[in-house]
Image: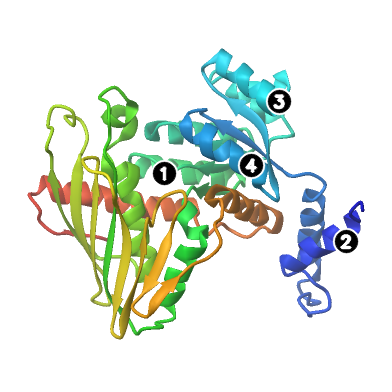
Amino acid sequence: MKEDPSASRRGFLRNFGFGFGGGVLRVGGMLGKLEKIAEAAQNLDRKVGFALVGLGSLATNQIAPALLKSKYCSLAAVVSSDPQKLQRWSTQYKLPENCLYSYETFDQIAYNSAVDVVYILLPNSMHSEFTVRAAHAGKHVLCEKPMEVSVEKCERMIEACQSAGKQLAIGYRCQFEPHHLEMIRLARQQVYGPVRLIEASFGFRLEGAEQWRLKRELAGGGALMDVGIYALQGARYLAGEEPIEVTAHETKSDPEKFSEVDESIFWTLKFPSGLIANCATTYLVPGMNRLWAGADQGSFELTSAFGYDGQKGQTHKGPFSFPATDHFAVQMDDFAQCLATGKKSKVSGEEGLRDVKIITAIYESIKLGGQPVQLC
């Protein structure tokens, strides 16, 4: 049976909290609410169109397949410096020629009404340039983590999107994954009492010496910028407060290979409540992948915590589990809902900026020989 579009629209609006029967609408704010309803309903006429900038492994193996699973999003355009790659994507995803862009012609995306969001999947030091260009083109931005390689560049990204009246979100997919959401619930609701200690670690063995992750100019850093940021994020969203001090140490087993970037870093965060988080990241060994919290009356953790799948939850009382989800699909769907309702993303540019500020302090502590660095 063909679905009734009006019924679908009503269900969509109910999910967004726009139901009339529940008394959501009030006379004083009636006009603004109705405008949001009209905007959300209009967005239902088609899915939110995403343009992918950078067609590497993440775009190919994760983002494009996720868009095929998405409820509210679709692939609308692609951007690459490789003409042959563009043609392959065009054939595979049935994209017309006017939806294929090079980095040089990217700004013409301003005239493509099928594109609502630009998803930036480039090396870290290129995020700011293309976020600013996307904002100037009148597009919302979803940018992979880390947000950028410096605080100044992050602030430039936020300002550009604010000036253009567009949303900026950072690709913190774990904040939408059910096992991580359960960890956050256990911590915030103090199910086992206040959390006192957190352990968070993520790393893998980086093979090969010829790749952008080993170039400071492109990556801005090594394991910390790449995957250590997941451990940093995990510590922050379990703590539910911002750290006030960091102490860090770095080790390198292969100084030649890692001459420009970090190989392994270990850091400790102190929080206002007295909570301590011990974190680690590495490019040296596989299998470092855990998020653990110790509270007054028990503990809870995730193993395979930060991978694209395979999360396993455990409390001191036993395991917990949820159906598998595509992390990227739910993340993009959440962003689409934010755009439809005008709600700010919980993984906004400001959230990305906080991580980069702490990462900057971690590197500063290393330069100071492991001395504590105070965080604002």
Which of the pair 62/49 is nearer the observer?
62
> Which residue position holds label 2?
7
Task: Give the label, 2 or 1, closer to the camera.
Answer: 2
The residue located at (44%, 81%) in the rendering is 189
Give left or right: position of 101 versus 299. Answer: right
Q: Distance between the residues labelled 2 and 4?
A: 24 Å
Q: Distance between the residues labelled 3 and 4?
A: 14 Å
Q: Which amino acid does label 4 sit on?
A: Leu
Q: Residue 147 shows which numbered tag? A: 1
Q: Is 71 in front, or is 351?
A: 71
Answer yes or no: do the residues labelled 4 and 1 have beta carbons within 8 Å? Answer: no
Please name the residue that numbered disc 3 is placed on: 95
Per the image, the residue denoted by label 4 is 67
Tell me which numbered mark, 3 or 2, is placed earlier along the sequence: 2
- Point out the tag, 2 or 4, that comes first from the N-terminus: 2
Residue 249 location (% of width, % of height)? 13, 51
Q: Would residue 122 be visible to someone looking at this image?
A: yes
Comes first in the chain, label 2 or label 1? 2
Residue 241 against residue 342 in the figure, above or below: below
225 horizontally vs 3: left or right: left
Quadrant in the picture for the C terminus = bottom left
